[in-house]
Amino acid sequence: MNKEKLVELIRSRKSFLCVGLDTDPSKLPAGVSTLEFNKTIIDATREFSVAYKPNLAFYEAMGREGWDILEETVAYIGHEHFTIADAKRGDIGNTSSYYAKAFFETYGFDSITVAPYMGKDSVSPFLQFQDKWAIVLALTSNEGSKDFQTQKIGEEYLFEKVLRDVASWGTDENTMFVVGATKAESLAQIRQIIPNHFLLVPGVGAQGGSLQEVVKYGMNSEVGLLVNASRSILYASSGADYAIAAAAEAKKMQEEMAVYL
């Protein structure tokens, strides 16, 4: 999916909601399989969301069955939503090329999250595919982000250097960045570095990030945001009404987003 279509999708649905499919088998309602749960959640949230983000760890842990479930889930989502492989890949040479081929061609994802620590030759292979995206980790919400990301490198923070350098390797048509919602106060300075790129923003919902703050500091003229919610939607109820509860939570988020659009 190219940028023009993504922006059009956001404006037509009045939503920039991404639903994270971090499907934990230990949290599913009794008698419901992972694939059934995913399909039901997708059906319940389709009209309120523009993107879905399966977290690969939950599928890889199941072995071959998990990969089959992942493939069926992506196929079920279809082409009217932006799909993100939350894989955090990144390696040199042919390895990154084959990661890109696996997720863009074999599984049909629109994008993949990428760890930039190994540098340009680990990221560039993901930028060679038309209408596909590398979503590069920049400033994350986890406790350990301060170990490297917010350390000074000369006159700038490491995350600022990542933003500046990675942005020069691609364009705002094939590169996005991950910025945690709990780092909303940093979005203003981030927008000074990358005014036109899309940001994938996890952490709104169960992690306590503020949608209002994210919009205030992070939205640009093309919206430029995909705000992810996972647990707050997936596990809005642990009972038989889980789909109804998920739909209600997604609708609530979409209605708030519509105000800002």
Image (cartoon, grey):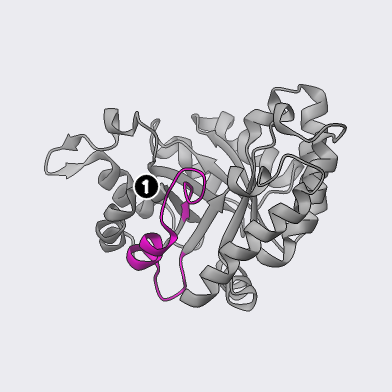
Quadrant where the N terminus sits is: bottom right
Query: Does residue 50 appear in this view?
Result: no
Front-most of residues 102 and 180? 180
Front-most of residues 36 and 130? 36
Instruction: Name the residue located 56 percent from the left edge and 34 percent from the top edge.
Output: 96
Left or right, 73 with respect to 5, comes to right
Which residue lies most toward the right here?
31
Give x and y (percent) for residue 90: 50, 33
Give x and y (percent) for residue 139: 35, 43
Instruction: Name the residue located 62 percent from the left edge and 35 percent from the top edge.
Output: 99
Q: Which residues are magenta?
A: 200-224
- Quadrant assignment, res 77: bottom right
Instruction: Name the residue located 65 percent from the left edge and 34 percent from the top edge.
Output: 56
Q: Is 5 placed above or below 86 here?
A: below
Asked whether 21 falls inside the magenta stretch, the response is no
Q: Secondary structure at mark 1?
A: helix
Residue at image mark 1? 182
Query: Does residue 150 appear in this view?
Result: yes
Magenta segment main secondary structure: loop
Front-most of residues 46 and 174? 46
Give x and y (percent) for residue 132: 60, 54
Asked whether 213 falls inside the magenta stretch, the response is yes
Q: Is 187 placed above or below 148 here?
A: below
Left or right, 146 with respect to 59, comes to left
Give x and y (percent) for residue 45: 72, 59
Q: Is 88 placed above or below 191 here?
A: above
Left or right, 29 with respect to 129, comes to right
Which residue lies most toward the left here?
155
